[in-house]
Structures are given as C-alpha cells and as structure tokens.
Image (tube, rainbow, N blue to C red):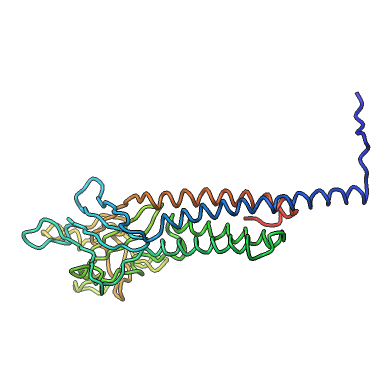
Amino acid sequence: MSTLVWPPVTTGTRLHNQEESTRLRELEWLLASLQDTLRSLKAGLEECAHLLAPVEPGSTLVLSSLRSENLKGFITRVGARIVKGDIYLRIPSLPPPKPQTSYKLSISSLPTAPTMMLQQLTTTRTLINACLDVVDATCWTGDSNNADFVSSQMRLLHDNIQEAKASLKGWTDSQKPWNEDPMDENAFMPPLPPNVAFHLSVSEAAVLLHVRTLEAAYPNTGTNTPLSFTPGGVVSSYSGLSLRERLATALGGPRPAFHDEAHEVFMYKGQEVRVRDKVRVESQDPSLMAAMAKLGALERSIALSRRALDTVMGKADDDDD
C-alpha cells in the first residue's frame, strides 16, 4: 500500500498562505455564528433579569429553624427589597413580653421606614444589566467583524456573568460580615431591640437569616483582664468556659452559650460585644435558584465560545482563565 499523498502537499510560502487563508475564512464564519450565540445569551440574560425584577406580589419565603422552635415566621421579597415579614423568636436571652410565648419582630410597612435590602441581589441585577449592554454593544455598536474587539467583549461578558453568579452563591469579597453591616432598628415596628442583631444575606441562591442576641464583651465584674486576641481582629478565650462562667452557672446564673461564635468578641456599632444566642435559618428561593442555574448555563456557553474564538485567533495559550 502506498503512503503517498496525491496531489502532493506544497511547502514553503504557498502552504503558509493557504493555511492563513483557511484560518481567516474559519474566523469569518465563527464571528458570524457568534452573533447568533450572543442573541441567545441575551435572551437568557433577560430571563435572569426578569427572575430578579421587583414584580409584585413578590416571593413569600417561610422561615423555620431546624429541629427547634427558636424561630418561625415569613418574609416577602420583591426584587432586592424585603417589604414585609413577621418573625417569632423563642430564645433564652430574649424573653417575650407577658403573656406572649414568643418575641415578635415585625418589618415596618411605614413609608418613612428604612428600606430593608438584599445588597447581593442589587449587585447581581447591576451585573446582568451590564451584560445586556455588552451584548448590545457587540452586536450593534461595535465592529462585529473585528476579532480582537469581539474577543475583548466576550471576555468582559464572561467576567460579569461569573461575578453575578458568585453574588448569588454568597460570601464574595465585597460582602460585609454581619457586625460591619448592622440593620437599621427603625426598619422594624416596634424598633429592633438594641441587643438584637438581625442580618439577611444570600447563600447558594437561598435567603439566609441570622438573628443574634448580644451582650457586652467585658461587663464590670471586678477585673480588667481582657480575653486573648487572635489574628484577624477577633477576640477569643483559651478555654470553652472560664471559672467565672462555671461558678455563675452553678449559682443559678444564665446558661453558657453554645454556638460557633460563643467565645468570640466583635466590634458592633462601636462597641465590643459577644454573641449570647444565635439562630440561623435558610429559606430556599425558587426564583433565585432558577436565576443561578441559568447564569451557570450562560457561563458555560460563553466559555466555550471564547475558547473556540481564541483557538482560531491563535491565542488559546496566551490567557490562563
């Protein structure tokens, strides 16, 4: 069997010119096909924007602590705003007024009340709108036949989609911890007690609520000896319970706190405090789950398109994403 190729492959400048001509035709075809991809991406982004839009009556989410009666209630989300809600607390450090059996927190409906916002959803909507602007600029304003321009726009689109998805997953670099982002007490009616910290956030496309009761970190107990400091500005004790705490409990004092922040000290509203009791409740939000799933699919689609374009442009190994 002969291994010769007929007609024989030319070498040198002629072969290089033919390869370059083929690559340019393939690039022209790919740039044209990317216009369809961008239109499909725009439709998906518009669906995500609709899922996060402030459309009445909004989403009512049930709040219930697992395996306990510590927290029960609901909140209603309209876009990034929490417009109403009632939360009932049964925790030892927050006794209810007599003759009630639980302490009620009601989100104020007064027009003068501060707006309770989920900042992560605001960030996500801003990034999605930025993506839509990028798609419009790529399809209508810029030169759709310029491979370098399209490549830079696709990179920007990819980055924005990744940031929007990360914002729905939660705990991004821009997200403040609870003690640096206190809730305005006037957002509730009656106002939130000064020893209660109420913090809402988004984690894995679910609304996450933490309610903490606080106490002074160093009450006047006849000693000025502080706790030991650990890296990061958080204060902790060396042991689980101090001798003073054990004696106080034995003499009928309040029980010690048992949670992951029990022996840390936080700076909250200019004061050093400890967390006496902590309740964590997670409520799945179908709209947020759908939006994050769509953003994940869009992220994969744009990544494939970018890889194909970089390969044809001959710079597949230039960027490490």
From the viewer's perspective, tell me whether residue 66 is left or right of residue 37: left
Q: Residue furthest top?
A: 1
Give the residue at x 92% y 51%. Answer: 13
Quarter occupied by residue 227: bottom left
Q: Quadrant of the N terminus?
A: top right
Quarter occupied by residue 3: top right
Q: Quadrant of the C terminus?
A: bottom right
* Number of numbered labels in the structure image: 0
Q: Camera-side residue: 105 or 52?
A: 52
**Residue 279: image x %, image y %?**
26, 56
Q: Camera-side residue: 198 or 154?
A: 154
**Residue 269: image x %, image y %?**
30, 74
Res. 215 visible in picture: no
From the viewer's perspective, tell me whether residue 206 is left or right of residue 94: right
Q: Residue furthest left?
A: 99
Quarter occupied by residue 222: bottom left
Q: Residue furthest front?
A: 140
Q: Camera-side residue: 191 or 171?
A: 191
**Residue 116: image x %, image y %?**
31, 66
Give the residue at x 42% y 57%. Answer: 170
From the viewer's perspective, tell me whether residue 130 is left or right of residue 80: right
Res. 66 visible in picture: yes
**Residue 180: image x %, image y %?**
36, 70
Q: Camera-side residue: 152 or 240?
A: 152
Q: Residue furthest bottom?
A: 270
